[in-house]
Amino acid sequence: MASPAERARGHRKAVAAAFLLPSLVLLGSLVVYPVGHSVYRSFMDRSGDSFAGLDNYARLFTDEAIRTALRNSAVWVVVAPAAATALGLVFAVLTERVRWGTAFKLVVFMPMAVSMLAAGIVFRLVYEQDPERGVANAVWVGVHDTFAESSAFPRARPGRTGPLVAEEGGGYATRQPVRAGAAVLLPLVGVAPDRLPEDSRPARPAAAAGAGGGVTGTVWQDFVRGGGGRPGVVDPGEPGLAGMRVEAVREGRVVDSTRAGPDGTFTLSAKADGAVLRLPAENFREPYAGVSWLGPSLVTPAVIGAYVWMWAGFAMVLIGAGLAAVPRELLEAARVDGANEWQVFRRITVPLLAPVLAVVLVTLVINVMKIFDLVFVIAPGSVQDDANVLALQLYRTSFGTDADQGVGSAIAVFLLLLVVPVMLYNIRRMRKGQR
């Protein structure tokens, strides 16, 4: 007959088992069974009826799309966690020294409250190619145009009749040399009314400079809105092309240059006598459209940038908590001994934060291996093959138009094998820190 102590222990075990049973059922049905079924399915063919052996796993290293996903996933694992951790470390250290550090931390951490789907939609708009819609290109084009202003006449061209002919490189030049004292007409078409310079005025024929003078002329839009007008003649209402650069070229060398006024008129010195007038290509350069952030070469760095924007706040909060536990007397002692702030940061702060940095880095590595929604939402369909990662390839292979759940299950098992060692390392470090 069992003693009262044994009966009490048995009762406690039964109560513990009753409380654990729902969790064990959920764990088995949502984790253990799917993992076991995926392992089983990874050895079967597309239909699931025949045993395929290791053929599905061999596809992981021979299929071009899966190899691209592996390569991109490796880039993600190396770059994204390191960038987010480094940025979080910088934010955590700098915000300790400012009064508004709490408000700054709140702003940096706020993206963590946004879902990956919502963040993907936001950054899809940020990376739009059109500078009028995409913030990234709006800033980039603004900086570019500050140092290299775009032309106002990108589509201007000579009409069917006129003195201008096309040159190599995109400019136009007169067929014949000009003479001092003459007035030259340089008609162009193709400038949209809303693209005309703001200071443009109705064009007027330039007055001849006369004997011994320079070369004068008019460059204008030879087109009357609504029709009418005579080709090659300055008609009322036709606008001058203000700011158009005109060069006088003799024997391949620019001897004089000027820009047209608001009414399209220009004047060159007597040096232009016998020279060819040229409208250089800089007048017709297409406006700078910015960077193709979502093109094949930049789509992966662009998506990584969105990820870092979201997770730098997470790293900052954890590192900030570790920084609060750093003994201040060690930092002050180093400063008293003559160390500057960079030496204190590199030799004392970072080594003391090494355990926290390791936990943050490993956690982000695990998170990055499962990245899916950011890539799926941000990368356009035309470049999704270039931005592909393992989790996205798993979805496309298993549930795409040409679904093969055998290969998809092999990708899932392979991804699990990559994640498990990192998880075990993280758990080991956490237990070591608790001891």
Image (cartoon, grey):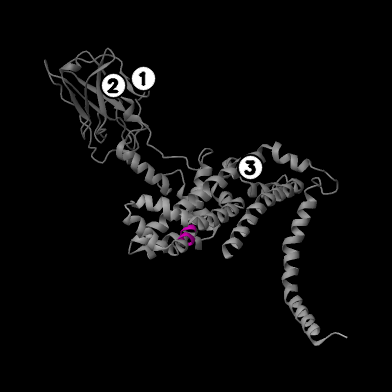
As drawn, is 239 to the left or to the right of 125? left
Q: CA distance from mark 2 to mark 1?
A: 9 Å
Q: Measuring 45% from the left and 43% from the top, which residue is drawn there?
A: 129
Q: Quick one: label 2 or label 1, which is nearer the N terminus?
A: 1
335, 411: nearer the viewer: 335
Callout 1: 10 Å neighbours few (<14), some, many (20+)?
some
Q: Position of residue 415 (x, y in %)?
A: 67, 49
**Could you tell me which residue is drawn at 31 percent across and 29 percent down?**
283
Q: Residues within 10 Å of mark 2 (few under 14, many from 20)?
A: many
**Sequence order check, earlier mark of 2 and 3:** 3
Q: Is the magenta region chiefly helix, strand or loop?
A: helix
Q: Secondary structure at mark 3?
A: helix
Q: Nearer the viewer, mark 3 or mark 1?
A: 3
Q: Which mark is residue 278?
A: 2
| Residue for badge 1 | 167
Q: Residue furthest bottom?
A: 4
Q: Vertically, is 411 above or below 279? A: below
- Residue contact between numbered discs 2 and 1, judged by CB atoms under 8 Å: yes
Residue furthest toward the front?
337
Q: Which mark is residue 70?
A: 3
Q: Residue at x 75, y 65 (%)?
A: 28
**Residue 274 counted in the magenta span:** no
Viewer-nearest residue: 426 or 258: 426
**What's the magenta region?**
315-319
Three-letter amino acid code at the position of disc 3: Leu
Q: Left or right: 201 with respect to 155?
A: left
